[in-house]
Amino acid sequence: MLRALIALPFVVACCVLVGWEADIEVLRRFGTSSVTMNPASALAFLALSVGLAVREHGGRRARTLAAALIAAGGLVGAAKLLDIAAGTHLNIDTLLFASKLGLGYVRPSRMAPNSALCFVTISLALLLMTLRSERAVIAAQAVALCTGVIAVFAMVGHLYGVDAFYVVGALHPVAAPSALGLLSLVGWVLVRTSARGLVAPLSDPGPAGRTSRSLLPAAVAIPVLAGWLRQQGEQAGLFSGEVGVALMVMLTMLTLTALIWQNARWLLAADTLRRAAEAEVAHLATHDFLTGLPNRGHFMDRLIERMNRRPGAGARFAVIAMDLDGFKQVNDRLGHAAGDAVLRDVALHLRHCGRRDDLVARVGGDEFVMLLGRITATGEAAGIAARIVQTLPRQFGPPGREVRVGISAGVVVADRRHQTPEALLADADHALYRAKRAGRGRFVLHDPAAGDPLDASGLVHDARIMASA
């Protein structure tokens, strides 16, 4: 695209110069019905386009030549402006084909002051880009956009036949090919710096860039096209002026509404994806990636929330700390992939053993905890712990290499002596340690009255009855 934007003003300039040399009128106008383009304007376009090509494809040594060519294009316009303002009679626009410039024309072919100003500004914009700083890029874009406004006015003036848009007083008007070449150079500046400065939103890969790339061209092209169709229809006598205005308004309104609606759908889809991604990130921040269970941080938040409730706001609650028995052998004999499968299976099992409102979390490698948010008696917590301990032992692995995995648990019922979550979990861990030391595959209920865990091996028989009930 950048090459095409450089090539267009070069081709325009060459065609115009050939047209003046060979007296081919259609080439002087570059195939348009507008006024002829002055040879000096063609030379300015040649200098600018060749300078850009040298800068893009040449080495470091070529940058000086490129800057000189670009500056030369601007100097052509500056000389014309000086000639108009000060009356210096430099006549830079008659240096070539002087004998042909006035022949057969009501108004002698001269460089328009609008074109001369644009050559100065676009040359300045191209030279500012060589500085590469952010401020220089923004300045280059701003100057280029000013040039583009003048060129767009000229193009619209030619399209609608409004002389005031491209003629300054009695001076020569801006030719349509000149406006086209200037717009091409402005487009090169904006595309070349699309990732920076004022036009950065256009290159954004997200919804902002997609929306701006869709709406901005339409906002320029649709009103121009609708107005031109109205003008052509009125001139052809197809409808009156009032009908033409109504048709132009309706066409513009319907087209822009359709574009805005489509962009709204894109934005909604992007926003839906963003919300889903945010929800996924939030889930990963509070849940274990392997098992899908809440992690330690989430469990602590829920435990603190439960402990901060007023004493009369609900029933008692308990915590069960659990640790797998024989899990190390799974990793050693079957590999870590098998170990991950065991952890996922255990997580599913613990969910089934708990009640709907209970919270199961993975807090370590093979360590789990369960928050029983509401119990009516200590035996209720013991019953759930017994169900977990007695129903979990399973064989994992292929025949001949099976590994038996069980679980040990420590149960603590919260009371007033547990002022912090850490104190409550310390009692649960102490009870779990006693269960491990007592032979594993069992649970121990913390006895707050004795200040030491109570070996619950004697309660296992009763717990089995509750689990089977």
Image (cartoon, rainbow, N blue to C red):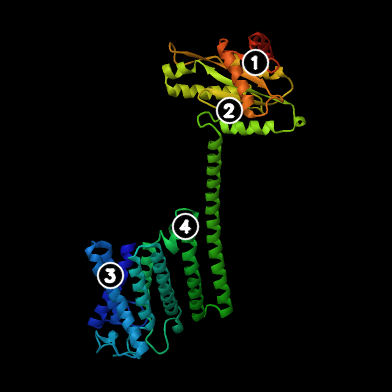
Label 1 sits on a secondary structure element that is strand
Residue situated in front as seen by the camera: 243 or 333: 333
Asked which quadrant contains residue 170, the reply is bottom left
Residue situated in front as seen by the camera: 101 or 43: 43
Residue at the disc numbered 4: 209
In the rendered image, the vertical position of residue 421 relative to residue 189, given as above or below? above
Where residue 110 appears, as percent x and y from the top left, is 33, 86
Whether the residues at callouts 3 and 1 have beta carbons within 8 Å, the answer is no
Residue type at tag 2: Ala
Label at residue 257: none
Quarter in which the C terminus is drawn: top right
Label at residue 361: 2
- From the image, state whether disc 2 or disc 4 is nearer to you: 2
- From the image, state whether disc 4 or disc 3 is nearer to you: 3
Question: First in sequence: mark 4 or mark 3?
Answer: 3
- From the image, state whether disc 1 or disc 4 is nearer to you: 1
Where residue 94 appears, as percent x and y from the top left, is 27, 86
Residue at the disc numbered 3: 67
| Mark 2 Cα-neighbour bin, 10 Å: few <14, some 14–19, many ≥20 | many
